[in-house]
Amino acid sequence: MRAIILACVVTSLSTSVLAAPYGVAEKDIATLQADMVAGRVDAAGLVEAYRARIAAIDPKLHSVIALNPDALAQARALDAERKAGHVRGPLHGIPILVKDNIETRDPMPTTAGSLALAGNITHRDAPVVARLRAAGAIILGKTNLSEWANIRSTHSISGWSAIGGWTHNPYVLDRSPCGSSAGSGAAVAASLAAAALGTETNGSLVCPGAFNSLVSIKPTVGLVSRTHIVPISHTQDTAGPMARTVADAALLLAAMAGRDPEDSATAEADAHRADYAAALNGAALKGKRLGLILPPPGQSLPASEPALQRALAILRAQGAEIVPIPVFVRPPASSEEEGTVLKYEFKHDIAAYLQSLPGAGPKSLADLIAFNAGSPRELVLFDQDYFEMAQAAGDLGDPAYAQARDELVASTRALLDKSLAQYHVDALIRPTEDMVFRLDAIKGDHDGPGASFLPAVSGYPHLTVPMGYVHGLPVGLSFIGPAWSEARLMALGAAFERAASARKPPTYLPSLEDQPDMAAALSPLPH
């Protein structure tokens, strides 16, 4: 399916466009906008340039599931608006990609990567997409993801879906882009779009952000709508932007944020949303106190430690005070409680979503389990044990569910709130993840402890910014704060980004072990 869609789009491009497209690589939104104002390119030219780049690069990555056949027409309409003197704002004419668990009204299915939803064309815009479209963004296409956002199995593989195949990391192709917003992360890192949307339940925005040397912001749960997004958990789910700069992520978040009458979690969104791009003006680290979350006693230092020490030196040189937080341990029962919450909520929420879809097709989790059991491609790499555990859970009226949810949210918020207040810090910081792990179809993911758990289960915001590289593999720095502190976190991240200049374009290396110095070290000495 993916190959057919891409082939149809590529053949529609003119030879001249394929031969010499406008250069979009590494260009931020401000530069693209300035070039459109100056007449060096228009929105239609950007769509064609990104399509040509996808055709040239994405066969290595498998990051794009489908391209929007209406994107060029939408771009031409926006160009006509610009010629008539109407510019909607800084996103006018900017092509973005959308994770394929987020609905758009365009003639593309929203599949969550599953063959069960291969024909799911709803012609509905998720409110987050509608807001971006109203701001002038062009929906270029859909990105690959970990199927069902990594909830189908305890042995699932980040970045793989039955429809999209396996996404590769553009820095080193045999490494993982992390999940579940893997395609969004790899595509934006490779400049296949100006930016992208991802989603997160626990780590699925910030991990691919860190692994692909990107800026990702997981907003406070309730800042942006979840309507018409394939769900996992109404307690933890949120959409968020992924971009190459904090400024670009801020532009998307400002457009996305706001109340949705269909999503009760967003009741306070309008009262807390901000002009996140304006909040970056004059962003500085001088006088800021940043609480450094230290590893538990006895735990060996991660491989990302050298990059962290360089980042801390930069933060101190910019005037920030680094405050060590030596005792920072998640509540003992929190992992088990999260598992309970996700199983109960997924069973309920996915049924409600499926029943909202037009036409025939699966209408419950039991239907999905049966579909997968009859679809060899779905189960060839890993099973659906998490689906089956969720199916065995009760309904949302079960006291066990309510107790787990209430205790989980209360205990994790208490830990974060206490740490922020006790140490009088503006934000908490730590490496987002350790090292990018290798793609492994047999053992699956090899991820270690990361920064995502507490902000994910508490619903608090979490920003990751490129911190540097270890052996050419990206590592990210996390900024975590209380509810509705996105503007503060993004200002801190922008100040660090400006001082560190850490991000580098991807290299598309086949393998680190193929590099001359490492290959020589791995080879035996001559006898």
Image: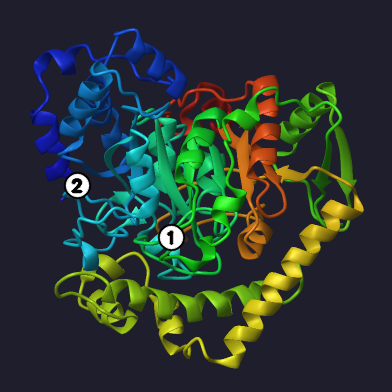
Picture disc at residue 2: 2
Q: Residue 229, percent across and down? A: 37, 60
Instruction: Name the amino acid type tagged 1.
Output: Arg
Compared with 315, 103 (above or below) is below
Residue 48: x and y, percent?
21, 24
Could you say which disc has been placed on residue 212 in the image? none
Residue 526 is at least partly visible in this image: no
Side (left or right) of 298 relative to 219: right
Q: Is residue 395 above or below residue 203?
A: below
Question: Upstream in the sequence, badge 1 or badge 2?
Answer: 2
Marks 1 and 2, how far apart in space?
A: 26 Å
Disc 2 is placed on an element classified as helix
Tell which of 145 and 341 is nearer to you.
Answer: 341
SS at circle 1: loop
* Image quadrant where one finds the C terminus: top right
Q: Where is residue 448 shown, x and y percent of the image?
A: 63, 55
Q: Residue under label 1, please give it.
A: 226
Q: How crowded is mark 2: few (under 14 residues within 10 Å), some or many (20 or more)?
A: some
Residue 140 lies, in percent from the top left, at 27, 37
- Residue located at (50% from left, 41% from top): 253
Q: Which of marks 1 and 2 is in front?
A: 1
Q: What residue type is labelled 2?
A: Arg
Q: Is residue 275 above or below residue 16?
A: below
